[in-house]
Image: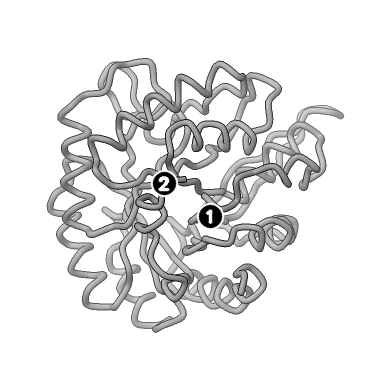
Amino acid sequence: MAQTTLDRIGPPDTRGICYSCDAVADYDIAVEVARSVGDAAKWYSVGILNDDQDLAARFATFCTEYKLLPLFHPIDLDLCGTDPYDPRVLTGIRDRAAELGTPWVNADLAMWCRGGEALLDSLVPMPLVPESIRWAADRVKHAQDVLQVPITIENAPYPFIIGDEDILQLMTQIAKRADCLMTVDVGHLYGLRRQRHQSAVLASDADVDWDRVVEAHMSGTFVRHFGRDTVVVDDKHDWTVADEVWQLALDLLPRAGNLRAVMAEAEGMAAAELAASVHRFQKASTQWWQS
């Protein structure tokens, strides 16, 4: 990877726990948690649309006041869509990233927009087929060139699955081709592999380019059974993290030598519950970071 990309992730002492809240509805919760957890949290992730300039400014001030480092998750960066990029959207994301001062921009490998409409809760995950590599990598590279800040690609949730490839292997190939970073959502990965009746950890995980992984996410999971063999695992940000997801994090995250932020995703949680989650993450973090 080009050294200029790695330079943007910051020194090892920037590693720590991140949390997030609903940017529109839960600002007061974000403040209450920041006051409660103190230095147990180091990062805060801002999930907003490209044109939410007032929210970006509000959370830039919030992060400064509570000594949190800002991360940015634009919810309309359409990395795997079929529509051509809207230049105004990319410019807006670039401006919000600059206002926040984020070291990278995180986005799911999914179709986030269709016909100019942000899909938000209805994003379509990237098909798990070899053809996705070139398509996604070209779009990531173009967006990264416009944003002038590294993109970290995230494995999306898979309420349905198209294709047989392993998501981490596809992400590695996309990241190498686009020269970008990676985010591993441990809960999404656990859900996908369980739906496929696979082991949570695969032998092929040894071939993942773990040096590119700078961010990880965990949240609750809701398992639904349809008949004897069909399982669907939903991402639940307002639930606590299941033991199986904690174990998968312990198995995989120590491989990521450049890991900087592990996020407790918590939209919809009450402040006290989210603060407890942040403390739990912070206590477990010594098992994730490489020395």
Classify 10 Å Cα crowding around label 2: few (below 14), some (14-19), many (20 and above): few
Q: Position of residue 183 (x, y in %)?
A: 51, 48
Label 1 sits on what residue type? Answer: His
Which residue occupies 57% across, 71% down? Answer: 281
**SS under mark 1:** strand
Q: Position of residue 16 (x, y in %)?
A: 48, 71
Which residue occupies 64% across, 59% down? Answer: 253
Question: Which quarter of the rendering shows the C terminus?
Answer: bottom right
Q: Is residue 283 above or below residue 104?
A: below
The residue closer to the viewer here, 146 or 279, is 146
Q: Position of residue 246 (x, y in %)?
A: 69, 61
231 lies left or right of 220: right
Classify 10 Å Cα crowding around label 1: few (below 14), some (14-19), many (20 and above): many
Q: Is residue 74 above or below residue 255?
A: above
Asked where in the image residue 267 lies, by quadrant, the reply is bottom left
| Residue situated furthest front in the rendering | 3
Q: Earlier in the sequence, mark 2 or mark 1?
A: 2
**Which residue is identified by label 1?**
217
Query: Residue 208 — which label?
Result: none
Label 2 sits on what residue type? Answer: Ala
148 lies left or right of 182: left
Marks 2 and 1, how far apart at CA:
25 Å
Which residue occupies 28% across, 69% down? Answer: 28
Q: Is residue 197 above or below residue 238?
A: above
Q: Is residue 106 above or below residue 68?
A: above
Q: Position of residue 180 (x, y in %)?
A: 43, 41
Asked where in the image residue 233 lies, by quadrant, the reply is top right
**Which residue is identified by label 2?**
2
Which residue occupies 13% across, 53% down? Answer: 54
